[in-house]
Image (cartoon, helix red, strand yellow):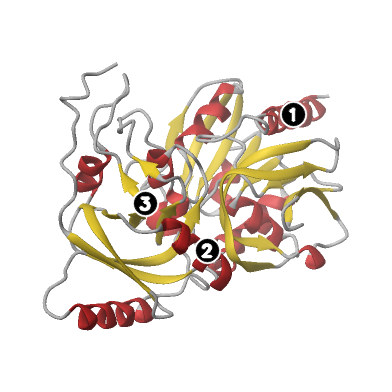
Amino acid sequence: MKNTEKNTITPPVKSCLLALEDGKTYTGKGFGAEGTAIGELVFNTSLYGYQEILTDPSYAGQIVTLTTPEVGNYGTNDEDMESRRVYARGLVVRRLSKIYSNWRAQTSLDAFLKKHGIIGISEIDTRAVTRHIRDKGAMRCALSTEISGDLDECRNKLVEIARQSPEMTGLDLTKEVTCDSTYPFGSGNFRVAVLDFGIKQNILNLLAGEGFELTVYPSDTKAATILNSHPDGIFLSNGPGDPAACVDVLQELPQLIDSKIPMFGICLGHQLLSIALGAKTFKLKFGHRGGNQPVKDLLTGKVEITCQNHGFAVDKDSVPKDLEITHLNLNDGSVEGFRHKELPIFAVQYHPEAHPGPNDSNYLFTRFSDLVRTERKAKVI
């Protein structure tokens, strides 16, 4: 264990304001970077994994409230990055730990946010924030350390900034989070094309662990380019924003589907496949975010505790007859997975890579691997 005296963090002293579009405001102490940030205010119920949450590209455009009461106690490190940078626009916590202590820690959460230019606010009642979002729904907000003069005027100004910020509905954020160019990852005897809509690092790790040679493509890659590489499988990643707004991606998906190449989608990939196959999506009131969501696998009858991060879902009543719903959320009955009755296609809404989170759903990567191997064997025969 590291010497905690060397890892003592100076408590934040600058004031910080959090203002919601409905006029609700909270005053706390700022940490991390200084300035003003806007985004959709959401909450995550995970007990740990703040670095993975912050660097998950699916949080692009959002300011995250963590419900666990103390955050930052084990620091941060370079190995737990889920992407190349922090994509969440801000962080809301009850208490920032005064020390961090872990054998893998390299720096404090405060220093980590400063490095990435992200504003944090502490010393506010995150239970009250979470209950407000749960009752009223996720909404736009503004977070600022730029406070001077009359406090009421600052609050009113920040509320107006929140109201003028973009709504998540209708927002395509895939170009903000995708890779800049095509790149290889892993090695193996089976080639899988990965469409990057904001993919997490651990998804790539687990796909490569199945013996796949991956080629990761930017989100705007044409279907013809992917098909010309003759992949054995196609994977559609997680990502942020409104799936129905991803018009360019949705135009290319029918060609990939018609190729009859095995396909697997996670989160945004699940939603995009659903739309391309005839279903519709809608915005959830406050979304599913955390590492404790119960999901029932209708194919086996088993219940999984899953890691989730999504604000949109597939409309159960819109699912066409050639799709079979395979997974349901036991909290609200929403669709968590499907498979095509004739084509080698399946997808899930939640995150089976479980980083952070439980390992109950890791089998889905093996299921995709088996599907790819079976289909290629059938072609050879």
Front-most of residues 50 and 376: 50
Label of residue 235 in the image:
none
The kind of secondary structure element at disc 3 is loop
Amino acid type of the residue tagged 3 in the rendering: Arg
**Label 2 vs label 1: CA separation?**
50 Å
Q: Mark 1 points at which residue?
A: 376
**Residue 267 x %, y %:** 60, 50
Dot 3 crowding, Cα within 10 Å, few <14, some 14–19, many 20+ = many
**Label 3 vs label 1: CA separation?**
52 Å
Please indicate, yes or no, whether residue 220 appears anywhere in the rendered image. no
In the rendered view, tell whether residue 57 sits above or below residue 149: above
Q: Is residue 229 left or right of residue 24?
A: right
The kind of secondary structure element at disc 2 is helix
**Residue 11 x %, y %:** 18, 45
**Residue 54 x %, y %:** 38, 46
Dot 2 crowding, Cα within 10 Å, few <14, some 14–19, many 20+ = few
Amino acid type of the residue tagged 2 in the rendering: Arg
Amino acid type of the residue tagged 1 in the rendering: Arg
Please indicate, yes or no, whether residue 71 appears anywhere in the rendered image. yes
Q: Where on the picture, by quarter, is residue 242? A: bottom right
Q: Which residue is drawn at 58% across and 43% down?
A: 228
The nearer-to-camera label among 3 and 1 is: 3
Label of residue 94 in the image:
3
**Label 3 vs label 2: CA separation?**
14 Å
Q: Indicate which disc, 3 or 1, sits on the residue closer to the N terminus.
A: 3
Label of residue 131 in the image:
2
